[in-house]
Image (tube, rainbow, N blue to C red):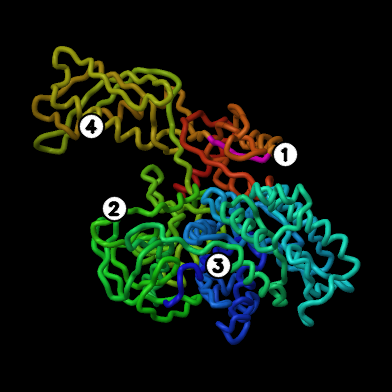
Amino acid sequence: MGVDIDKKRVVTVCGDGGCGKTTLVEDILFLTKKITRKGSTDKGNTTMDFDSEEIERKISLQLAVGNTQWKKHLIYFIDTPGYHNFIADALCGIRAGDSVLMVVDAKDGSKAQTERLFAEAQREKKPVLFYLNGLDKEDVDVNAAVDSIKNDLSEKAFLLHFPIVENNEFKGYVDILEQKAYDYEKGEIDVPSNLSDMLEEKYMELVEEISTYDDELMEKYLEGEELDKDVLVKTLKIAIEEASFYPITIGSALKGLGSEQLLNSIIDLLPAPKEEYDKDVALVFKTYNDPQLGKMSLLRVCSGTFSSDSNYFNVNKDQEERLGALQLMQGKNLSKTEEATAGDIVAVAKLKVTQTGDTISTKGSDIVCDFVEMPLPFISYAVYGTSKGDEEKLGAAISKMIESDPSLKFERNDETKEFILTGMGAMHLEVTASKLKSKFGVEATLKLPKVAYKETIKGKTRSHGRYKKQTGGHGQFGDCVIEIEPLSRGGGFEFEDLIVGGAIPKQFIPSVEKGIKAAMEQGVVAGYPMIDIKIKLVDGSYHPVDSSDLAFQMAGSIAFKDGVVKCKPVLLEPVVEMEVYVPDENMGDVIGDLNSRRGRVLGMEPYEDKKGYQRIRALVPQAEILEYAPSLRSITGGRAFFKYHFSTYEEVPQQIAEKIIEESKQEKEG
């Protein structure tokens, strides 16, 4: 594209939902004359939010890419969603970018999602530039916003600029390192006298911090020598690139104030792309799958050169893949380009085998780019088509959506016979259902999934089952005596043949077992499958002509059904083992909530991967956590997260069992 690699920047725009990321990118595109009119999220006409669902909901649901030029530099912006429900695209965007522009609402300060995204940027070792947005709002306390960043994210965050406010109006800014002041209308001005002391204080603080990254600089600073500005900026850039210093700039995206200094900071302080490998390599970090547009893959070129209409190789799939026209994306708008080099982001239509996370390279390459690990889904719903036609199309449509959104999971629960859609939150799944209708014409209903209850017994008995039928010609005859007893939890099913003397011929023994297993599928308490039962086949009789496989299946079934009601049958529920990761200050509330859900806390310990967090382990009935995710977010301000796996089955308390039995009865009658 005719731009040297050192004059490129690939910046991922992140931040909490509603902090103004899309508005900021829109303002930059307008300022740099990439668009002729500045849109707004309220009007649904921004460049980056182009999906119909985004326009309707007025929030970003997926990442989008734009590009612009500033001072002979080419800058790519990856605008990402800010709500936790759509964090997968934010993580993919962070992986594809070289640095992160973390937008923070100046009034709200750092929030839960900011923490999560900043932690990901740190994990990826990506430089972060903070942008305090909304300086035009009333009663904004910049120092409080900076403190929230320092306290919640990193002590190594420092202001590069602070605001000039006159009569409660955001008029301009002071550049701390340059020790100069700027009015947004008048240009450079004298530093206001009421801010000179603050400038001196902030300057000394900033210079002292920068000096710690260079021994020679530190020595000069301690000796009181005048420090060269160019050396300071060079040292600052190194510290930022090493992700050990986090600069903070300011502005108002809505009012179009501060975008110029932000662009200057991006090209002056954030790193250029690097040739990561010695081969042509690109990472597919996003897939759009739209019935109108078709499949569109976004490629971040990591090294080398890619050309339009050329054959390449999907390293993950070990298959050849032809790339058609390479296209630059400005939101949904496409423009062709003949080639792409390291640092470029291009879209390619209709790739056959390639999916999000795959590496494209030249044939013979064994380079596989690292990709993000998708977060554990939080919440599951059963998904039903509203008509038979919708049921048939459901699986294919959701598969297409999973190509676009790998944080979705879709599977069939063999026990409840439901199709289960799992995602990052209730809104995530609601948007998915809405897209199924608007994009694929499939109307789907979401319901809380059924719980896979079971039944078992607590007592033992002996039972006789006889099946005899005479209908002219050969009849049917099967006769068996069984003993029924409980197994320990997790024992499953055991069948013991104790027949002696040929009371039942060998060929009919499996028939008795088959009949009992079939009867166990429909329990006697609420119709749920029975588990953890042992059967001993102890006696029986047969007829040399009328006995058959079917007759002994029926005899086994009768014996079991008659006997099991005498064995103190009970209802069982699945219990999961949970790990809940909670900020220290929320631990008591979370434990109280788990107790209210009939949970039993097994233990707690400090969480090594995150300072100030505890890991709580607990056993909780699955029925009690079907809607746990939104409750946990509410209790902890969105800062906690959890995972779980099936542990065991336990007896349902009588009062709760009665309610489940009644619901089961009504469902059958319905």
Q: Are marks 3 and 4 in contact (CB under 8 Å)?
A: no
User: Where residue 569 sits: x, y (%)?
Assistant: 45, 27
| Mark 3 vs mark 1: in front | 3
Callout 3 amino acid: Asp
Q: Is residue 634 visible?
A: no
Q: Which residue is mark 2?
A: 366
Callout 4 amino acid: Gln
- The N terminus lies in quadrant: bottom left
Helix or strand or loop: what does disc 3 sit on?
A: strand
Q: Is residue 593 visible?
A: yes
Q: Are marks 3 and 1 in contact (CB under 8 Å)?
A: no
Q: Which mark is residue 585?
A: 1
Q: Residue at x 13, y 26 (%)?
A: 507
Magenta part of the protein: which range?
578-583
Tell whether 95 sits left or right of 653: left
Q: Which residue is mark 4?
A: 553
- In 3D space, how far apart are the residues under numbered discs 4 and 2 (Cα atoms)? 58 Å
Q: Earlier in the sequence, mark 1 or mark 4?
A: 4
Helix or strand or loop: what does disc 4 sit on?
A: helix
- In 3D space, how far apart are the residues under numbered discs 3 and 2 (Cα atoms)? 31 Å
Q: Which residue is mark 3?
A: 79
Relative to the observer, which residue lies in front, 490 or 53? 53
- In 3D space, how far apart are the residues under numbered discs 3 and 1 (Cα atoms)? 33 Å
